[in-house]
Amino acid sequence: MTRASRKSDSAQPPAVAPRLLAWFDGHARDLPWRRAPSPYRTLISEFMLQQTVVATVIPYFEAFLARWPDVAALAAATEEQVLAAWSGLGYYSRARNLHRAATAVVERHGGAVPPDEEALRALPGVGPYTAAAIAAIAFGQPTFALDGNAARVVARLRAVREPIDRPATRVQLRALGEAMVPRQRAGAFMEAVMELGATVCTPRTPACPRCPLTVSCEAYRLGLVTAIPAKSPPRPKRPVSAVCARVRRAGRILLVRRARGLLAGTWTLPTVERARGQEADGAALALRVVTELTGATARTLSASRVGEVRHVFTHRDLVAEVYDVDGPLASSLADAPDAQGRDVRWASAADLTEMAVSSLLRKLLAAGAPPDGEPASRARKGDKGGESP
């Protein structure tokens, strides 16, 4: 019997929730936020899991809970401390918003994470998905959180062929998902949908023979599993060219705190972006940005190119030339805002462990360094950083 003849087009598919919950009870992964669950633990995990895979999140989640075991402790931390603990996890606006959300929970709700979506949506950084996820998972509210995994599962179950990244399609998918939510165990059902999408109903090569919902899946019945979900063509990333200056003094390196952008709040090397089409000399740009920060005279400094780093963001493809800048600097230069109000700091290797630093900065600091056992002169030829953010 073929899949298409197994049931007629008019047949009512079996209920999704009982089959999925039974599967989840026997196949749920042992994840730290599922142990001793609480609204606070769900809040932390949902912020961290936005656009980040589970394996990457686990050590950060455990470190956060060890350092800030409840929402009051997190609200009492400084933003700098939270960003430092977030270093390497990426999308730093999440860390800033998580800290602000914890502060709002303490100030507006007496330290208790609110249970309803409307109140959750009013917290900084909490959008429709995060609010629904917390309401369902932490409080058992009968709602549906549409993340990437859930969107893919619902699109295949109901053979939704429109691109799932379109707003109208996402509204449709959430409505379809909400229609499946059971009256009992709504939170477990929401986690089960996400779990199925993460482990079985995956984007590529889904494991349909192991799926508990094949009897309910329209995409499977129609032979469209690999064609669904559809997505709109990706927009090309904007190329960005930059020059970064590494300046060392007495075992410390000169850093500047970013005031805006994706990495706002993190520390980086003194950097200048080239205007599109600009062909300015990289060494001259490196010297310029250093003299602006330090007040040194350009003619007393020298700049040597040590390498090139590529770093891919969501919408930008950055190529940064790295220059070591040497020469006498004012001994009175202190950790303080410069004339333009930028935070400037001389940081030691030990300082970096307590500062908000991105993976991009780590790549910039390592530019030109040879792999173990390889001569520096060989490693610096055509040196390029990795492509992952």
Image: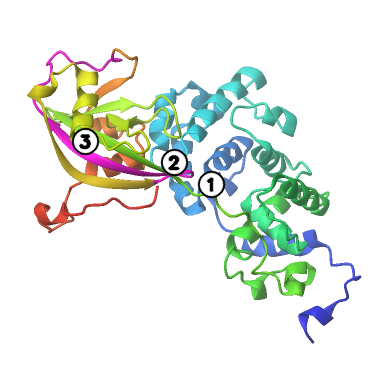
Please tell me which residue is depicted at 34% across the width and 41% down the height of the picture: 360
Q: Is residue 121 above or below residue 166?
A: above
On the rendered structure, is 75 left or right of 164?
A: left
Question: Disc 1 to disc 2, how far (Cα)?
Answer: 9 Å
Q: Residue at x 21, y 35 (%)?
A: 281
Q: Nearer the viewer, residue 305 or 164?
A: 305
Q: Any mark on residue 365, and which?
A: none
Q: Residue at x 29, y 31 (%)?
A: 271
> Is there a contact, CB below 8 Å, between mark 1 and mark 2?
yes
- Decide whether residue 134 is among the magenta residues: no
The residue type indicated by label 2 comes to Gly
Q: Quadrant of the N terminus?
A: bottom right
Residue 334 inside the magenta-drawn segment? yes
Q: Which mark is residue 51?
A: 1
Determine the residue positioned at 33% across, 47% down. 310
Residue 234: where, in percent of width, then height? 55, 52
Q: Which residue is mark 3?
A: 281
> Which residues lie in the magenta part?
312-338
Which residue is most to the bottom? 1
Task: Point out residue 226 in the picture as x, y percentages from the top left corner.
Answer: 64, 69
Q: Of tags 1 and 3, which is closer to the observer?
A: 3
Instruction: Give the amino acid type for the residue marked by disc 1 in the picture.
Output: Gln
> Is 214 situated above or below 86?
below
